[in-house]
Image (cartoon, rainbow, N blue to C red):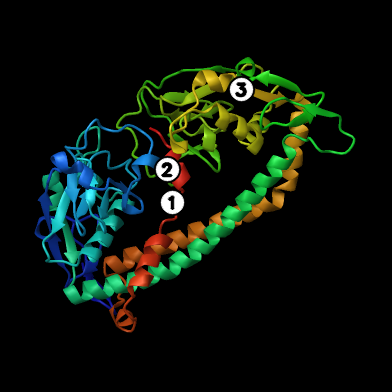
Amino acid sequence: MNAQNSNTGYLRADSSMPWIGTFPDDWEPTPIRAMLKRKCVRVGHRSSEYDLLSLTLNGVIKRNLEGMKGKFPASFETYQEVQIGDFVFCLFDVEETPRAVGLSAIPGMITGAYTVYEPTGKVNSEFLSRVLIYCDEKKRFRTLYKGLRNTIPKSSLESVRIPVPSLEAQYLITKYLDHAELSLSKALQSKRELLKLLQERKEAIVNSRIIPSEVEDMDTEDSGIPGIGRIPKDWKLIRIKNAFRARDVRSKLGNETRLSVSSYFGVVERSSHTVTMFEASSYIGHKIVRPGDLVVNSLWAWARGLGVSNLHGLVSPVYGVYETKFKDLIDQTFIHLLIRSNRMQWQIQLASKGIWRSRYTITPEAFMNLQIPLPSIDVQKQIVNQINSATKDTDYAVQSLKDEIRLLEEYRSNLFAEVLTGRKNVLEAARKLPDLDSKSKVQLLYDNQDIDNEAMELSDD
């Protein structure tokens, strides 16, 4: 039965399009094959003429080969050409992929594993892009998945029908959402900047207290270790290998919680943080992490790509996972704060090797040979309590900001869903809005780049 809406007339639902829900009865369900045409132009020996592109939560972006990590093909000749206005799809591992579709605003080349389409001109590309991203954000195409890798067959994608309004309505809807996104992005950007300042404030407090070296009446001595400096005389210097041992237990089913490493927070649930790198096709054989384990991404340890986990789950097989030898003598929170502190980071950076800073790697042997200053367990707990007390107000402010950011993001998601499906009529409001100039659109593009890029880089599945 159709439901009436005072703004749009009647809303209807179509059981063949569960990804949309209700939509205005004057919107025309149109298959993707009528709006996009599949293409595949291999770059061949001309690969040096193209910029390397990647599909991320920020859309299709240009990647800096010098700053990238991970594996590279011996040749880019099998990569395919992407032109401005092309749509790029990742049709495999769709459930795990942070973003499975993007409209490219730049030319370049992208891996042949992706599927590239060019618009036919029968629909506003920006409107279609927003609808496809709306469907992708909540993985609304689950009914199309095939196989263990959650692959969407190209023919199935091309048969997907999407309700489309008139070209004028598409343009007005896009304009309205551009204005809404610009306004929301400014609000989110200011909150994220404040959040970063608060996180830096906490980091400064931790760095000043984790190794007390300038406290009045405290007897200290030079540690002799670059970066560590002076430490209390009653603290011991021990090598990490004498306090921790490597543990390599692999998952048999791959069903455990997927973990990642954030430069800001250490070991976190992957689903709770924005990580734009693709996930593995299978988690069988990934390393199991237990609460209290020290987890190290050797590629990014120099940028705080390590930490003690409070969680049970899985990390990449290339990560180092270490368990403490003496649980009664080591406080896991103290070690977490110590190993990520500025003074330890200096030592880790010196021990990391590589051609480029962004490709520095610390071997397991070099990491285990690092020395850490360690007081008694009572002093460790005392320092942790002091830091917790000193950062209590900051932690509260950080959590409040995170809640505000989450609410704004939820509002944005709900608003876009209602507008893109026609359940909220914004046509008259959009007609009163000015067209965004090119400067505003560029600002919108960059304001949207709010991804925790360091979390992206620290993920190495």
Q: Which residue is mark 2?
A: 456
**Mark-to-mark CA distance, 3 and 1:** 32 Å
Q: Please state, as top left, top right, bottom left or bottom right, where the N terminus lies in the image.
A: bottom left
Callout 1: SS: loop
Please, what is the three-letter code of the amino acid marked with disc 3? Leu
Dot placed on the residue nearer the N-terminal end, 3 or 1: 3
Callout 3: SS: loop
Left or right of residue 218: residue 249: left
Please tell me which residue lies in front, 49 or 118: 49
In the picture as drawn, the residue positioned furthest to the bottom comes out as 432
Q: Which residue is mark 1?
A: 451
Residue at horizontal 64 percent and vertical 15 percent from the top: 242
Query: Closer to the observer: label 2 or label 3?
Result: 3
Residue at horizontal 43 percent and vertical 40 percent from the top: 457
202 versus 372 height, above or below: below
Contact? badges 1 and 2 (CB < 8 Å): yes
Task: List x then y, in percent, for residue 235.
Answer: 77, 24
Please, what is the three-letter code of the amino acid marked with disc 2? Met
Residue at horizontal 49 percent and vertical 22 percent from the top: 363
**Mark-to-mark CA distance, 1 and 2:** 8 Å
262 versus 348 height, above or below: below
Q: Residues within 10 Å of mark 2 (few under 14, many from 20)?
A: many
Contact? badges 2 and 3 (CB < 8 Å): no
Dot placed on the residue nearer the N-terminal end, 2 or 3: 3
Number of marks in the rendered image: 3
Task: List x then y, in percent, for residue 254.
Answer: 37, 27
Please, what is the three-letter code of the amino acid marked with disc 1? Ile
Q: Which residue is mark 3?
A: 370
Task: List x then y, in percent, for residue 207.
Answer: 69, 41
